[in-house]
Amino acid sequence: APVAEAPDAADPAAPVNVRAHGKATAAQLKRWEAAWGRDPFWSVSDSTGKLNEFELKGISFAKDKKGYAFINDQIVSVGDALGGYEVSLIEKDRVMLTRGVQTFFLTFSEDK
């Protein structure tokens, strides 16, 4: 009988008899071993990790040194929400956005 690795509550490394569990289990084991393909957590970014939905258009600092960023058509400052992200940091040439444990830096487009 063919033997394949499968997760088991008692012993994750224990071999499983595929024939004993039937064709459905064999199909599940095949899917288990298959490659994931694209990373679902990078759905809003391109292959370099840049967020495609935001365009940093400008950065300005007030006299009190509070930073403001012009992103898409909004002016935001630290603590503001933007498309599910929080503006965490504004520097002279980049803006840091955070959502949970994800952190992204927006920089000026090099296309212009």
Image (spheres, rainbow, N blue to C red):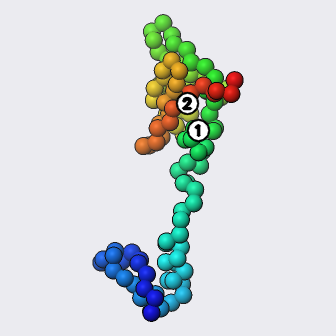
Q: Is residue 28 above or below residue 106?
A: below
Is the N terminus in the top left, top right, bottom left or bottom right quadrant?
bottom left
Q: Residue at x 37, y 82 (%)?
A: 15
Name of the residue lying farthest toward the left: 10
Residue 80 image point, x, y percent: 51, 29
Q: CA distance from mark 1 to mark 2?
A: 8 Å
User: Whole-percent x and y of residue 41?
Assistant: 53, 50
What's under tag 1, amino acid-wise? Leu
Residue under pointer 1: 51
Horizontal arrangement in the rendering, residue 45 relative to residue 79 (left or right): right
Label 2 packing within 10 angstroms: few (<14), some (14-19), many (20+): some
Q: Are marks 1 and 2 in contact (CB under 8 Å)?
A: yes
Q: Can you give x and y, in whole percent of width and height, for residue 10 in the image?
A: 30, 78
Please name the residue shown 51% across and 18% down the image. Answer: 92
Q: Quadrant of the C terminus?
A: top right
Residue 106 is labelled as 2
Provide the secondary structure element on which disc 1 rests: loop
Q: Residue at x 46, y 88 (%)?
A: 2
Q: Residue at x 47, y 91 (%)?
A: 19
Classify 10 Å Cα crowding around label 1: few (below 14), some (14-19), many (20 and above).
some
**Residue toward you, 16 or 86:** 16
Q: Secondary structure at mark 2?
A: strand
- Residue type at tag 2: Leu
- In the picture as drawn, the residue positioned furthest to the right comes out as 112
Q: Is residue 70 visible?
A: yes
Q: Earlier in the sequence, mark 1 or mark 2?
A: 1
